[in-house]
Amino acid sequence: MSKPPSETAGWRAGKPIEDPEKIKPWGFISAKPSEYLVHVRNGRVLHASSGQGASCFKWPRDAVAIVPTSLQQLRFQADQVTLEHIGVEVTGLAVYRIADPLLAYRVLNFSYPERAQQKLEETLTAMCVGAVRRLVANLTVDQCLQKRKAAIAEELQRELAPVVGGSGRPDDDTDRGWGVVIDTIEIQEVRILSDKVFAAMQAPYRIALDQRAREARAQAEKEIAAREAQNRLETELARLDTEKALRERRLRDEREEAEARAEVEARSRELEAQNKMRRWELEAMEAETELASLNRKSALLDERAKHQRAQAHLDAELRRLAAETRLAEGQQEAEIIRLQGIAELPRAEAQARLVVAQNLPQLATALGQRVGGIHITQVDHQNPFGSIAQAIHAVIDLAHSASARRKTGENS
């Protein structure tokens, strides 16, 4: 533990610097929660103002001690020759605390807390060093190294704890003590001071260690060789198993491939047969469709022929009706013309007579020129001029007939 700063001048030169709040001659003085305040007046402790973390007003005639009750630790180091005359160095750690401040302030001057704590640490360190030297002198090196907890630390605890704990030394009948409790003492290191002795002590262990190492190495090599042989055997067996598995796998794959190929071929043949069936069905359907189409075409052609025949019959009937109509109309027109001719015949005869009468000289002249001469072959003795009149009348009828035919031609 590092030492606190010290005074450099005055009667306290070299001593720790104290907290001015704890050593002032009068005024209010307070203790921290980890400190115990002891207020003394006229040689008696004032319990009303004393206590853990307490505060009081100090008069110039009063005395106040502030005792730290927190855990403290100290390190100690002791050199000693063992029972075998071998020098060793022991390093340890002690953890302590003031458990009874009302007892501790009597043996240590806690009017100056820092100095009292320093003196307590120095005293405990010296006690630990002395006890360690006394114990190590009666122990062997092996006991110091291997049983340092039981041989040193516990013995230190057993010797020092009663002294500082309040019951005095084991052989002390009084009830005096320091009010200090040592919680634990730990031996951190036991070191042999002579390197030669340390090496000599380590030699048997090193030899034994080397021998154990060689044996362990040989055993390890043996085990490694055995494991390698086992591994090679296992590897070879695994390889054989693998080859066997591969052959079986290959045979199984070939068999499965053959089965798959056969299945594929069967499926292919089945699909081909199905395709053929479908083609046949399609061809049959196409034939049926074509036949149905032909039937529909034939029916359409028959229907069309029937329609054409009906149309032709209708057209013929219409032509017949038209012809009959025209015939009837022609007959009606002919009848009308006939009736008109019959109606116009008297007028025509009268007109013809008039024309003949008007043109009789020219007609006579023409007849005379054309005839040249009239020969009378028969004479009616009763009416000798009747034959002449009949002949003239016949000529008039002939002219009238010619005129009627000419009009009929013009009308048609």
Image: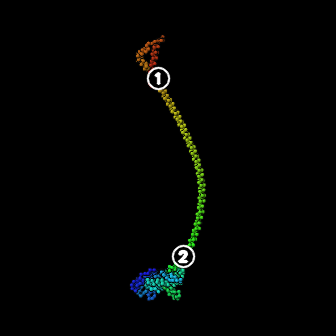
Q: Residue at x 60, y 63 (%)?
A: 237
User: Between 244 and 274, which is closer to the camera in this rendering?
Assistant: 244
Quarter residue 250 falls in? bottom right
Q: Split into 4 quadrants, where in the image is the N terminus?
A: bottom left
Q: Mark 1 falls on what kind of element?
A: helix
Residue type, mark 2 in image: Arg
Q: Nearer the viewer, mark 2 or mark 1?
A: 2
- For label 1, count other residues whose C-alpha is less than 10 Å away and answer few (under 14), some (14-19) or many (20+): few
Asked whether residue 343 is in view, the answer is no
Q: Where does the image place residue 405, in percent across and percent down from the top left?
A: 45, 22
Q: Relative to 64, say whether 339 is above or below.
A: above
Q: Relative to 263, say whether 138 is above or below.
A: below
Position of 392 with respect to 263 (left or right) is left
Residue 206's tag is: 2
Asked whether residue 9 is in view, the answer is yes
Q: Residue at x 57, y 45 (%)?
A: 279
User: Between 192 and 401, which is closer to the camera in this rendering?
Assistant: 192
Q: Mark 2 falls on what kind of element?
A: helix
Residue type, mark 1 in image: Ile
Q: Where does the image place residue 327, in percent across and percent down from the top left?
A: 49, 28
The residue to which callout 1 is attached is 342
Q: Earlier in the sequence, mark 2 or mark 1?
A: 2
